[in-house]
Amino acid sequence: MTSSSQPTARKGLVVLAGNNAANGPFTPIVIVVRNAMGVKAFNQLRGKGISLHSQVIKDFCKQIGADNKQIQGLIRLAKKNGEKLGFLS
């Protein structure tokens, strides 16, 4: 029987930010730029780029009358394409 007064160990939360992408044609460029800028600055820049791209997708979809489900599907597709091309390396 275990004592209920003993604290239990908790595992920390792990957040993955797209750094496990496959090698694509843009992977070497991404790695060189990341090493030159530093990881933190590079991830901030990449985050801004992803945010701007998502906003362009949303604006386009609203112009053509797409619903939210279609918008989210296109954003997921853009992420998958970015992984294949090596932008998320």
Image: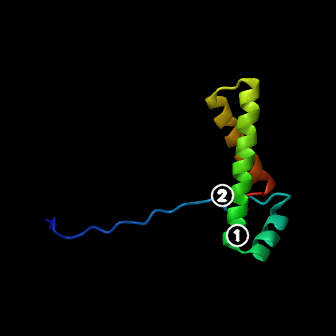
Q: Bin the neighbour count of mark 1 within 10 Å (Cα to Cα): few under 14, some 14-19, many 20 and up.
A: few
**Tag 1 secondary structure:** helix
Picture coordinates of residue 1 (x, y %)?
A: 13, 65
Question: In front: mark 1 or mark 2?
Answer: 1
Q: Is residue 80 visible from the viewing direction of this image? A: no
Kind of residue sitting beneath label 1: Ala
Picture coordinates of residue 3 (x, y %)?
A: 14, 68
Q: Which residue is mark 1?
A: 41
**Above or below: residue 78 compared with residue 61:** below
Residue shown at the point (40%, 66%) measured from the top left: 11
Count of marks overlaid on the render: 2
Q: Is residue 52 visible from the viewing direction of this image? A: yes
- Spatial CA span between label 1 and label 2: 15 Å
Which label is found at residue 18?
2
Horizontal placement of 36 versus 6: left or right? right
Q: In front: 80, or 42?
A: 42
Color encoding of the figure: rainbow
Residue shown at the point (81%, 53%) measured from the top left: 85
**Above or below: residue 67 compared with residue 11:** above
Horizontal placement of 61 versus 5: left or right? right
